[in-house]
């Protein structure tokens, strides 16, 4: 993340006020390779192309906060690979991880991964080490430790339907699975921080928490996410959930979250009311239908609508209601920046 952006993010989290309206996006492999003009395989396999494409993005839009910035990842294969998942890399689509188990009754045989050696994790760390000097020399630092959340990882290891069934039929085994994955996630976050002491932020991505009701959320999500967000004492504790997020929003304080990226289907005002004044909201225009597929004028209208959803704009990072999707053009990004600047001015 750019040093100036990080230096402004910390006071924003601390309920300070900035003299401008920050705008930014979560960017990774669904968007960067296509925008830069390389294949996804080149992006994943070449440290040099990975660095150059990320650098091009941050230099093309210097006023945007790219979150987390220089994200070392292999799509949804990253964490499941450490548990032994077969990884499928296709040229024209995102990689995916195949199931390791077929039901919760098999969960006990899953390994306890070593985050220093298993799966793709050492390659992620080494990519950052190989490029750390270049990242620092371009006025950025490695600021975030990143992982998918335990329910998201569990859904890859056994299937989403199977996980939802297990929550209802075998809660004891489900807790054992989520507990094992949570310990793995904490080890993984702490290892990233140990490798890069500049890290003082955590980004957890988990859409599956939006698939369950409130009672199940309190039992199967709250204790594990609270453990994860407290394990590194990070100052920036960022949660991405762009599925249904109304239940999640009510429990952000208990989770230990102070930044929240949520679905565009929820208004900023609605989420602010549920989340309270402490949380920095990251959103909230439609990523696919507007940012990727819409016109520049539609982007401007979506930003205008978002600004009208809340009277208090002091603790918002204007963004998409989710990560940056494929096929977002530079013109639409610039239209977004221009619109945020336009509506930031008192009218």
Image (cartoon, rainbow, N blue to C red):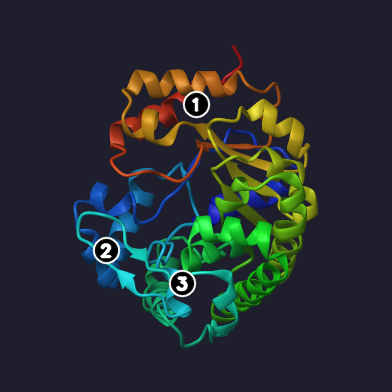
Count residues near mark 3 (Cα–Cα under 10 Å), then give few for <14, some for 14-19, many for 20+.
many
Count residues near mark 1 (Cα–Cα under 10 Å), then give few for <14, some for 14-19, many for 20+.
some
| Secondary element type, mark 3 | helix
336 displayed left or right of 330: right
Q: Nearer the viewer, residue 170 or 128?
A: 170
CB of mark 1 within 8 Å of CB of mark 2? no
Q: Is residue 75 visible?
A: yes
**Label 3 – label 2 distance at C-alpha:** 20 Å
| Secondary element type, mark 2 | helix
Count residues near mark 2 (Cα–Cα under 10 Å), then give few for <14, some for 14-19, many for 20+.
many
Against 292, residue 106 (above or below) is below
Q: Label 1: which residue?
A: 341
Q: Position of residue 334 (x, y in %)?
A: 36, 32
Q: Position of residue 88 (x, y in %)?
A: 29, 68
Against 132, residue 5 (above or below) is above
- Taking the spot 29% from the left edge, 57% from the top edge, the residue there is 53
Q: Position of residue 136 (x, y in %)?
A: 45, 68
60 displayed left or right of 145: left
Q: Label 2: which residue?
A: 43
- Taking the spot 29% from the left edge, 72% from the top edge, the residue there is 47
Q: Label 3: which residue?
A: 80
**Label 3 – label 1 distance at C-alpha:** 40 Å
* Tag nearer the camera, 3 or 2: 3
* Tag nearer the camera, 1 or 2: 2
Q: Nearer the viewer, residue 129 or 37?
A: 37
- Taking the spot 33% from the left edge, 45% from the top edge, the residue there is 60
Considering the image in quadrants, where does the C terminus appear?
top right
Q: From this viewpoint, which residue is outermost toward the top?
A: 347
First-in-chain label (1 vs 2): 2
* Residue 295 placement: quadrant: top left
């Amino acid at each position: 993340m750019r040093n100036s952006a990080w230096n402004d993010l910390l006071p924003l989290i601390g309920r300070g006020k900035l003299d401008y309206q920050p705008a930014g996006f979560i960017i990774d492999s669904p968007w960067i390779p296509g925008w830069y003009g390389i294949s996804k395989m080149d992006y994943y396999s070449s440290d040099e192309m990975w660095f150059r494409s990320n650098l091009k993005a941050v230099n093309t839009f210097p006023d945007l906060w790219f979150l987390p910035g220089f994200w070392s990842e292999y799509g949804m294969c990253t964490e499941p690979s450490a548990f032994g998942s077969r990884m499928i890399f296709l040229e024209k689509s995102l990689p995916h991880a195949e199931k390791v188990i077929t039901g919760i009754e098999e969960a006990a045989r899953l390994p306890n991964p070593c985050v220093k050696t298993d799966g793709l994790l050492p390659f992620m760390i080494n990519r950052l080490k190989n490029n750390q000097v270049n990242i620092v020399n371009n006025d950025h630092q490695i600021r975030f430790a990143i992982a998918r959340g335990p329910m998201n990882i569990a859904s890859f290891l056994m299937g989403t339907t199977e996980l939802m069934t297990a929550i209802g039929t075998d809660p004891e085994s489900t807790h054992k699975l989520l507990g094992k994955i949570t310990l793995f996630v904490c080890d993984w976050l702490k290892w990233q921080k140990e490798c890069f002491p500049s890290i003082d932020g955590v980004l957890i991505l988990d859409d599956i928490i939006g698939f369950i009701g409130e009672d199940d959320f309190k039992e199967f999500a709250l204790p594990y996410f609270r453990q994860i967000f407290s394990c590194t004492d990070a100052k920036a504790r960022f949660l991405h959930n762009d599925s249904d997020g109304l239940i999640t929003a009510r429990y952000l304080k208990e989770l230990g979250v102070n930044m929240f990226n949520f679905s565009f289907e929820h208004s900023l005002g609605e989420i602010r009311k549920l989340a309270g004044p402490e949380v920095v909201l990251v959103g909230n225009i439609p990523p696919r239908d507007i940012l990727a597929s819409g016109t520049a004028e539609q982007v401007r209208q979506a930003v205008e609508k978002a600004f009208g959803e809340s009277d208090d704009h002091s603790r918002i990072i204007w963004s998409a209601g989710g990560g940056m999707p494929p096929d977002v053009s530079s013109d639409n990004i610039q239209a977004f920046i221009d619109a945020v600047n336009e509506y930031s001015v008192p009218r």
